[in-house]
Image (cartoon, rainbow, N blue to C red):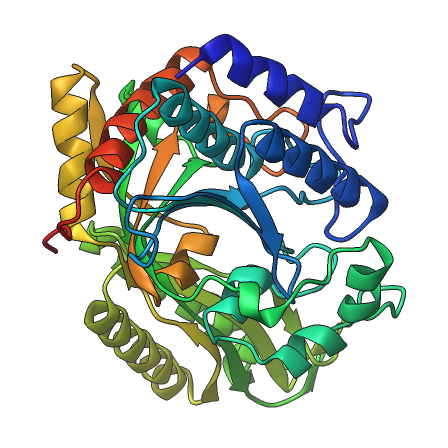
Amino acid sequence: MNRERLMQRFSSMAEIGQTDRGGVNRLALTEMDKQARDLLWKWSEEIGLSVRVDDFGNIYARLEGEKVDYKPVVLGSHLDSVPYGGKFDGTLGVLVGLELMETIIEEGKTPERPLELAVFTNEEGARFPTPMLGSGAVTGVFTKEHVYNMKDDDGVRFEDALVKIGYVGDSFNRVTEVEAFIELHIEQGPVLESKGVPVGIVNGIQGLSWHSVQFFGEAGHAGTTPLHHRKDPLISSVKAIQRIHDWVMNLEDETIVTFGKIGTASNTINVVSNSATFSLDIRHPDHSKLLSRIEKVKRLIREVALEDDTESLCEDLSYMTPVSFDPGLSELLSNACRKHNVDFSEIVSGAGHDAMYMNRIGKTVMVFAPSRAGKSHCEEEDTSWEDIEKAGKVMEDTVKRLAFSTESVKS
Ligand SMILES: [Zn+2]
């Protein structure tokens, strides 16, 4: 791949919605998003790709293969950002995908399989409040009615915003099946950098489960109710949080717990409240292990209530199943790393990505590039071009192996 050309396109794209401190403001289906889409469309046509858009505004740029009815090899990510976000998140996967396609075109050989570049709408969930909306819609996770009627903070409907920027295409244009989907993305965390490794091969995306935990006790006066007479639900909450936290620390596995919110019903300085609530976010990359962690956490909560003579309730709010990516594709990538002497590490993604839903319609894998200081979703987001070039090299090798063969990868 041509690093100079990639860097030039990257800096032109970063100018669209650029912030004072070098980030981008490019919320989905805004004028800035339109400009980014228009530029990508123009570049794609210039290098000879045929570009189409589906009814969710997802864009696809296609290089035809010898076997036109074979399932395509698809690269891509998203161009939208969070408010005051970074210029690498999403954009990197799109522009490296375009660069790899141009590299293949320049070499003059037609691939066996079609190659496509995909740009998905509203990945961030920052404007329309569901992340990975475009990829979820096209893979059957969300209905068209749900997506079209979703509103932003100003009450603007998704469909109206899509019409306004001129990106409503035909449902006939949707991606339906893929031979392989490969998404390059920045890690958005500190793991690769701390290991000093330039490439992460992503095995999957961890699952998560959200709960609201409540303890019930007895209300009392802060001055007149002696401590040993109290049934203080906040004390039970704090004890439960500490106990869950210590248990997870001792597990020393991939389980992660977070208690982001805590409060009492009275929320008053001189009152023992009759109830207290905290939130519980628990994550693990394996479905059955995640379920067993949730059961254990619920037992710990009940234990505390029994000891304190309070009552507890653990309500389930939402659950996202862990995703495992294709081992055959991971192996192709790791072989490419060895061939090019590129150090790599296997990694699990802590964040959701379009690849999570694309996994439903074909073999999928992700490649991570290190994030400086693990920073992301902020203007400081940064990744070195040396690392990007290494990831690009490994992907180029893998994409060529897939696109120039009529055989399927073995999972
Ligand atoms: Zn992203």
Location of ligand 1 given as a quarter of the image:
top right
Seen in the picture, residue 214 relative to 175 is either above or below; the reply is below
- 236, 359: nearer the viewer: 359
Q: Residue furthest top?
A: 4
Image position, residue 163 (x, y; %): 82, 63
- 13, 130: nearer the viewer: 13
Image position, residue 112 (x, y; %): 25, 42
Whether residue 222 can be seen here:
no
Seen in the picture, residue 202 relative to 311 is either above or below; the reply is above
Seen in the picture, residue 79 relative to 67 is either above or below; the reply is above
Q: What residue lies at 36% left-to-right and 26% top-to-bottom? A: 104
Q: What residue lies at 29% left-to-right and 81% top-to-bottom? A: 299
Q: Quadrant of the C terminus?
A: bottom left
Relative placement, left or right, of 59 versus 175 is right
Q: Residue furthest right?
A: 154
Image position, residue 251 (x, y; %): 20, 55
Instruction: Find residue 345 and report its image quarter.
Output: top left
Count of numbered circles on the image: 0
Image position, residue 201 (x, y; %): 26, 37
Q: What residue lies at 16% left-to-right and 14% top-to-bottom? A: 341
Relative placement, left or right, of 324 versus 368 is left
Relative placement, left or right, of 187 versus 359 is right
Whether residue 387 can be seen here:
yes
Seen in the picture, residue 228 relative to 72 is either above or below; the reply is below
